[in-house]
Amino acid sequence: MEQVNWLTGSLVFLAAAVLAVPIARLLGLGSIIGYLAAGIVIGPFGLALVRDAQDMLHFAEFGVVLMLFLVGLELEPRRLWALRRPIFGWGSVQLIGSAALMFGVAMLAGIGWKLALVAALGLALSSTAIGLGALAERNLMPTTSGQSVLSVALLQDVAAIPILALLPLLAGVGVASEEHAAPSGWWSAAKAIAVVVAIVLGGRLLLRPALRWIARSKTPEIFTAASLLLVVATATLMQAVGLSMALGAFLAGVLLAESEYRRELETDLEPFKGLLLGLFFIAVGMSIDFAVVLQRPAVVALVVVAFLLLKALVLWGMARLMPIPRPERPVFIILLAQGGEFGFVVFQGAAQAGVIDAPVSSLLVAAVAVSMLLSPLLLVLADRYWIPRLAGAATPRLKEIDEQQSAAIIIAGFGRYGQVIGRLLFANGFRPTVLDHDAELVEVVRRFGWPVFYGDATRLDLLRTAGAASARVLVLAIDDMAQSIEVARIVREHFPQLTIVARARNVRHYYELRNLGVEHIERETLDAAISTGRSVLEQLGMRPHQARTLALRFRKHTVDQLELMRPHSQDEAKLIAISKQGRQQLEQLFAQERELASQRAQRTPWEAEATAADTDR
């Protein structure tokens, strides 16, 4: 009987997703709205095909865990360290600012301070799942707004822990046993720190050798099982000490971001993440308590509108101070103004601790769920009415490339670097297909007569339309390093016949491209810097021919040295040793050159002719 129920439940969930999501996408509403609508239809207040919404929500939270693990894989520790100020700075501004504003309004409305504080803290949290899911669906994660949403979401995951710890104190629990509470709190904190340290050290010292050992078995399904085991084990450890499962998975992902198995981990876990994340959204739709909504619709609507507007006010002020482009501000505001899944936990925990009544908790939970349902709808409205107004004429909405091209050369990226290459090719009679995803740039260069198409080269379908299947050369001149690497990966996988000639922003970018099999790479500043150095040598009295020869030798040595260091790019000690050795060799070579030049300059004309004659013999 239990097996039949399990099969029936699977049938209901899969059928609902398969029917609802394509319909939602067809209507231009996005897949998240489709999942939420499917949950409402099959939930207790729809057709009642599934009744245990809360149990399903707890299970489906693993989709959020997998999502944050994959997000962590895209962030190397250096990039995460670079985000520390947005995370703890702007993240704290959003959380504290929103909670303080809502607490103040609630107090003015005559609500008790305990309820006002719990409601303000719970409603200040946003949905990580919907926020990052919407960013991924729109390919906005690498943008400024995407990184800002990620930073604030990470701070909220961290802040949820002290918020939950505050609930027993608000209920008056532990007043009589304060002497025992402090050691218990210190012990919990020590355990949490120990687990985080264990995950960091384990990721550095154990995970990569373990994955390497498993990969030697050459059994794909075992590597997939190991990937899932890694995420589940990390989430279990974090949950055991009262920390966020998703935050632990994110930390594990960051530690493996520079691993050679990063792409394989992404490929193995992506299908599980998509299915479980869809299940999470379905469970959120099922959990909306329409009985509470219908019983007090005006109160629920007032709570939803009030906290959305108050949070949006704080976020609007942040967006103006942060370096977020105007067209991206609506996405930033809408995705963080909504309530979040941690709000469910806070309100349910507050009800269990006796801080708020159960009916009030149900009302607040319903308000959070309704806001999560409204968030994707608000994004659709913003796309149609708000963002175009902000964009205006500065960032016109251009039609993407849709006509099949057949040029032998494709240029991806037509900024300053790509334009120089394009001018050289056009001057020599070649007419490449040029792609750029910056609408403003495309409009400007078109006014100067350049035939440039609007399109994102990281999309496989647009590359096919641009003629990648038949072209001979792809010039990779994209400014953003992450997007450049992604294009190279897609081309190597789907168009192996296409020769990539790439631009590298720095040495790390060069190594990433070389590891993908790209052979023709030019560092964007190398030749300009060498030409400048050559001019300096000439100004110091060196003959132009000699300066040119030394510059060419220096360039060859630099390129050779880079290739020599590439296999050891993760070993800093080895890199330093090779760099020092190479610098000594170069200094010795140039010292010999200067000595020979000095000797030639001191010879008499007769000696010079004799030396030349000897050389001819």
Image (tube, grey):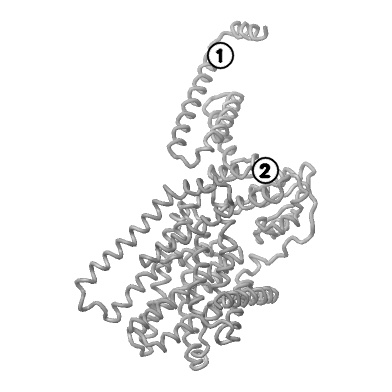
Q: Position of residue 274 (x, y in %)?
A: 59, 66
Of residues 351 and 378, the one drawn nearer to the viewer in this rendering: 351
At horizontal 20% and vertical 78% (from top left) the residue drawn is: 176
Which residue type does callout 1 highlight?
Answer: Arg
Residue 493, compared with residue 56, is above or below; it is above
Of residues 298 and 348, the one drawn nearer to the viewer in this rendering: 348
Of residues 418 and 109, the one drawn nearer to the viewer in this rendering: 109
How many discs appear? 2
Quadrant location of the C terminus?
Answer: top right
Residue 268, compared with residue 17, is above or below; it is above
The residue under label 2 is 501
At horizontal 53% and vertical 44% (from top left) the residue drawn is: 508
Which residue type does callout 2 highlight?
Answer: Val
Give the image quarter of residue 133.
bottom right
Quadrant location of the N terminus?
Answer: bottom right
Residue 39, compared with residue 134, is above or below; it is below
Q: Position of residue 19 (x, y in %)?
A: 67, 76
Cα distance in 3D space between marks 1 and 2: 41 Å
Of residues 418 and 270, the one drawn nearer to the viewer in this rendering: 270
Give the image quarter of residue 435.
bottom right
Marks 1 and 2, the one that precedes in the sequence: 2
Which callout, 1 or 2, points to the residue nearer the camera? 2
The residue under label 1 is 600
Local secondary structure at mark 1: helix
Q: Position of residue 150 (x, y in %)?
A: 49, 64
